[in-house]
Amino acid sequence: MSIYRAVFRNALKLTWQFKYLWFFGIFAALVGNVGEFNLALENFPRVSKNASFLEVLRATYQQGWFGSFWYNFKELITSFDLLGLILMLVLIGLILFLIWLAVVCQGGLFATAYKIFKKKKVSFSESFMAGRQNFWSVLWLNIIFKILIVVLWIVFGLPLVFLYLSNGAPGIQALFVILSFIVLLPVTIVFSFIIKYAILYTVTSKVKIKEALAKAWNLFIKNWLVSLEVAIILFLVSIVFIIAVFLVMTLVFLPFSFLIDITAGANLVGMAYSIFVVAMVVLVLLVFWLASMWSVFMHSAWAILFTRISEGQVIAKLVRMFHGEPQIE
């Protein structure tokens, strides 16, 4: 039996048996960094937009709008009244709380999946406590990941941006897109592996950030092919999952659509609107439920894989195929 099937089977079993982890999955999904090829897919339209954005940026540069932007920004800030200031502070507080909760849930989910796979009993409160205890480490690792990505895009993209701003050199947009997919996205994927393993080291071994990054780098170097294979499998599974979610949502909405047509045809506009609202609520709740389970499954799969490769138990599928090494359970 394949190692990967064992990893995914255990992740699926963990996801269904420990339903309290769905709460963690909802907010951990806000942090992300679990689907590497999903990350690449999400960046495809972003790269195209960035290439088109170069034209807008050049027009803005030529018309001298950057100075006026700063002036308008200061005018906006000074125009706030007391109520507007209070609402802004409440909004900032809500955003900070969601960031705190998302980071806590990510750390707690990774730690819990690891402990469950190691046959340890864990409760909801213990999972939440694990996330709280590792909050700052997990937060800083996520920040480091974002900073690395920004620096990477700046280093590779800024020279092209300045070249285009200065003289609008033809072919710069195409070069920007090509460079993004040849260099930027693969390196981004590698960064995501390292940060994920570093987070797992911090929540399971209580090591400092610097040590966690060093250990994560060594673990990735030794198991880069395994990591890549798992990322590809999860990407393919995620496509199937998205299609399945779309089909489920369609089937759930069909009865509501039928009722809406009947009530609207009978001029019962209020009832048709109420049915539509109920349908939207049901669909939103369904999406949150499925997304939370998917998040738990993804985090669990990486935590279980981390456990196996950190113990030196996993051989890449391609290696086993071409060299015939024994498959380890």
Image (cartoon, rainbow, N blue to C red):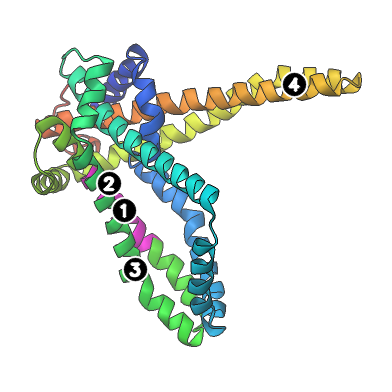
| Residue designated by label 2 | 142
Q: Residue 190: within the magenta?
A: yes
Seen at 24% across and 14% down, the residue is 123
Q: CA distance from mark 1 to mark 2?
A: 6 Å
- Above or below, 319 relative to 165: above
Secondary structure of the residue carrying tag 3 is helix
- Above or below, 44 relative to 241: below
The N terminus sits in image quarter: top left
Residue 273: percent from the left, percent from the top? 77, 25
Q: Which residues are magenta?
A: 181-195
Label 4–label 2 contact, CB within 8 A: no
Label 1–label 3 contact, CB within 8 A: no
Instruction: Indicate which disc, 1 or 3, sits on the residue closer to the N terminus.
Output: 1
- Three-letter code, disc 3: Ile
What is the residue that sits farthest to the bottom in this orientation?
Answer: 167
Q: Nearer the viewer, mark 4 or mark 2?
A: 4
> Which quadrant of the structure image shows residue 198?
top left
> Which quadrant of the structure image shows residue 160?
bottom left
Kindly identify which numbered label has been placed on residue 154.
3
- Three-letter code, disc 1: Lys
Seen at 17% across and 26% down, the residue is 327
